[in-house]
Image: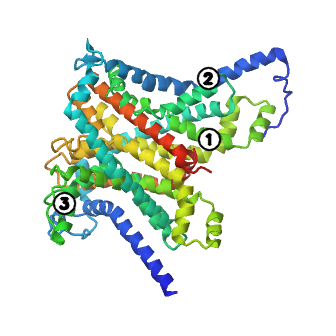
Amino acid sequence: MIRRQSKHLLHYAVLSILAILILYPIFYTFSSALMTPEEMDAYPPRWLPGSLYLDNLSTVNELVPVLQFIKNSFIVSTAVMIGQLVTASMAAYAFAFIPFKGRQLLFALFLSTMMIPWEVTVIPNYLTIREWGWLDSYPGLTVPFMATAFGTFLLRQFFLQLPRDLIDAAKIDGCGHWRIFVSLVLPLSRPAIGTLAVYAFLTTWNMYFWPLLITNSDSMRTVQIGISMLQWQEMMSWNLVLAGVAMVLLPSLILLMLGLKQLVRGITAGAVKG
Amino acid sequence: MNKTEIKPVSLTTHPETNTLWKWKEQATGYLFLAPSILLFVIFLFYPLVKSLYLSFFLTDPQGNIARFVGIENYVKLFASSGFLNSIGVTGLFTLYTVPTSIILALIMAVLTHQKIKGIRLFQFTFSLPLAISVGTASVIWMLLFHPSSGMFNYFLNLIGVGPIFWLSDPNWALFSISLMTVWMNIGFLYIVLLSGLQGIPDHLYESAKLDGAGVWNQFRHVTVPMLSPTIFFAVIVSIIGAFQAFGQIHIMTQGGPVDRTNVMVYDLYREAFIHFQFGTGSARALVLFVIILLLTLVQFKLAEKKVHYQ
């Protein structure tokens, strides 16, 4: 009994140490974001702010348009998410339910695109976007990412697990592919679609290289680029920088809280069993 | 789908309408694929070919072709110490980050794959880094790494060790970047491995217990073999991810000090978008492509032999 309890205790101790290591940078960010400049400068450094000092949030937003960055990232991520959901679900439907010539070949081609690292395409894509006059614009930030081989694969695997009888019955009822797709397959696939939605949103939200290349005005910058420029502004004090970081972190933390289950299910379904 | 009006389904039985039906199916199939294919052609296949093409030329800063040089770009690349250095740095970075993140994530996954009180809180905590992007993570860690006012040196000072120039000391910079990268990657790997664990059927453990296997033997003979496809996936994804690291380098060290953190993608970025050498930049991109492709293929070959699939 005692041995069992001490084993439990050890288990919790290890877990707690690991949790502290993971949490510390996040805790440091939020705690510093709420400190007054004096508290931030104190030595030895303080662990917690004396009060909830919210001025940093408004000050940093006056100096740098953090809210605009968040808005841009939100628009870009949502657009890419919707784009990927549309293109991937349509392609996945074709691969799962429509027998057409060259289906296997095309599917293999889709899968092989997953092996192409985007670095190989970045120079020509940059030249294309520049030629089209899409630099520093929403289309330039979103359109190149609206198709996804991974998403297509994920949804196809899910579609194939749907009860075949339902779809055959709908066909016998005279439903065309569009109707089956929109009113049968899509509603039944909500879990997989949810997964892809969260995944697409998060990946786009976190994109760094591409927005760095093609945005150059504050009005178009995404969060990642805008926030990384905070620390290059010399006169900015640390608690202001971290207040900016905290503002940016909050939406993704909330999204993670809401979408974690979906994401876990998706990673299991698409990546692991695939 | 509640309408149940029954239409006669003659389409598949009448030969004369059958061809028409087949044609329609074909067309619908391609129509459903059209948006994806269009985007892939413009933003993936065309750029791939264009990269290869560009890599045989020298270009002016506008990206226009200046002169055909054939494979000279590649020859020069493999003779340049800077490029070889970037391959070495990338390899070292992979070595520092991949095993560490996977082992740590595995420990976390195993420890939280149990029904004990408060486990959900730990599960959430360990997946937190997933929500933190490279931009924000780099800013936070840069402040933590700061030589005089950063918290890491403060903690070291408390135990009488002291100060480390995390990002500016050539011997520490890559290690520091790796440390931050491990932290950043753990969320994703943890979720992948935990999902893998949850997919192992309970009865396997029960029969192992019946055979008298202890915790360690259960881990060795049930968990590891059953989890190997997942671990394998995690390894591939991590290695490829390590070869593509960019943001943390760009924000924290810009490839320095003395090119000690100049990984391949940063080198490519510098060549193409700071020096505006799109030709030689493309050559770098293609070498990276080949390396990643080879790694993936090698891993798949190895995995076929060693990994246990259900």
- Which residue is labeled 2 in the image? B30
Residue type at mark 2?
Tyr
Task: Report how many numbered discs are placed on residues in the image.
Answer: 3
Q: Residue B225, can we see it? A: yes
| Chain where mark 1 sits | A
**Residue A157's spot in the image, x, y percent?**
62, 41
Report the colour scheme. Answer: rainbow
Question: CB under 8 Å between callouts 1 and 2?
Answer: no
Looking at the rendered image, the disc whose residue lies closer to the viewer, 1 or 2, is 1
Estimate how packed mark 1 is, as few (under 14), some (14 to 19) or many (20 or more) residues with alpha carbons within 10 Å: some
Q: CA distance from mark 3 to mark 1?
A: 48 Å
- Which residue is labeled 1 in the image? A157
**Which SS class for mark 2?**
helix
Q: Examine the image and state in which quarter residue A13 appears.
A: bottom left
**Which SS class for mark 1?**
helix
Disc marking residue B150: 3
Compared with residue A247, is residue A154 higher up or lower down, i.e. above or below? above
Looking at the rendered image, the disc whose residue lies closer to the viewer, 3 or 1, is 1
Compared with residue A197, is residue A55 higher up or lower down, i.e. above or below? below
Question: CB under 8 Å between callouts 3 and 1?
Answer: no
Estimate how packed mark 2 is, as few (under 14), some (14 to 19) or many (20 or more) residues with alpha carbons within 10 Å: many
Residue type at mark 3?
Gly
| Picture residue at 54% right of the left edge, 61% below the top | B223
Discs 1 and 2 lie in a common subunit:
no
Q: CA distance from mark 1 to mark 2?
A: 19 Å
Q: Examine the image and state in which quarter residue A100 appears.
A: top right
Compared with residue B224, is residue A123 higher up or lower down, i.e. above or below? above
| Chain where mark 2 sits | B
**Which SS class for mark 3?**
loop
**Residue A69's spot in the image, x, y percent?**
32, 42
For the C terminus of chain A, give its image quadrant.
top right
